[in-house]
């Protein structure tokens, strides 16, 4: 991706978060990015193409975040790493801003993108199976839902301290 494409995506993410996707014009994105509107059309075709690029960027970052977890052979360690993932992310302000913008777009446009969670879900199911949980798929779904809720709470209320809940989950799963 070129520097100008990155500027366009960053500007679009910021504006979509501030004003909403539907209220943001490509001319506003171009102005914020310091590029011509035509350059947006050349690289992304239209505003929907720009949104697709942002969503794909989120999917790539999710894959990168989950890569170490998914490849973990020890089931307890895999679960622990997943539970502690948000502690790591919460220490990086740039990551917080990126995910906040991704969540805001997801909420406004009612796009969940469950497919980006397939690898981590499969890894969690496998871990719960190895640990002989009675309902490994339901445990994986429960943990995914709880962590999604924690992320949402953290994004909406940055003073929220998730450490107690993280410790509770680690105790619950004995990791």
Image (cartoon, rainbow, N blue to C red):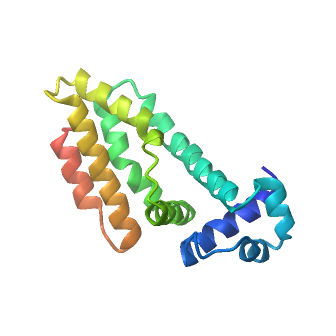
Residue 124 occupies which quadrant of the picture? top left
On screen, residue 36 above or below 44: below
The answer to which of 137 and 64 lies nearer the viewer is: 137
Task: Determine the residue positioned at 61% across, 47% down.
Answer: 56
Residue 175 visible, this angle: no
Residue 108 makes an appearance in the image: yes
Determine whether, in the image, residue 18 is placed left or right of residue 45.
Answer: left
When asked about the image quadrant of residue 74, the answer is top left
The residue nearer to you, when weighing 99 against 113, is: 113
Which x, y percent locates residue 121? 36, 35
Q: Is residue 43 above or below residue 20?
A: above
Give 150 or 107, whichever is nearer the viewer.
107
Which residue appears farthest toward the left when viewing the image? 134
For the residue pair 164 and 59, the one nearer the viewer reads as 59
Quadrant, the C terminus? top left
The percent position of residue 19, horizontal first and vertical second, equals: 57, 78
From the viewer's perspective, tell me whether residue 145 is left or right of residue 70.
left
* Residue 27, x across and y down, in percent: 76, 75
Total marks shown come to: 0
Q: Is residue 79 left or right of residue 103?
A: left
Q: Tell me the residue at 86%/70% (across/down).
A: 36
User: Where does residue 62 sit, x and y in percent of width and height?
Assistant: 51, 45
């Amino acid at each position: 991706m070129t520097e100008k494409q990155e500027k366009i995506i960053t500007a679009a993410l910021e504006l979509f978060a501030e004003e909403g996707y539907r209220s943001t014009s490509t001319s506003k994105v171009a102005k914020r990015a310091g590029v011509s509107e035509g350059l947006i059309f050349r690289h992304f075709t239209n505003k929907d193409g720009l949104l697709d690029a942002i969503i794909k960027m989120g999917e790539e970052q999710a894959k990168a975040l989950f890569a170490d977890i998914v490849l973990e052979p020890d089931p307890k360690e895999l679960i622990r790493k997943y539970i502690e993932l948000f502690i790591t992310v919460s220490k990086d302000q740039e990551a917080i801003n990126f995910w906040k913008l991704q969540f805001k777009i997801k909420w406004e446009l009612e796009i969940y993108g469950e497919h980006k969670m397939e690898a981590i879900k499969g890894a969690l199911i496998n871990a719960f199976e190895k640990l002989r949980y009675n309902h490994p798929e339901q445990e994986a779904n429960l943990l995914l839902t709880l962590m999604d809720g924690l992320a949402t709470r953290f994004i909406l209320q940055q003073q929220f301290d998730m450490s107690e809940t993280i410790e509770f989950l680690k105790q619950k799963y004995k990791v």
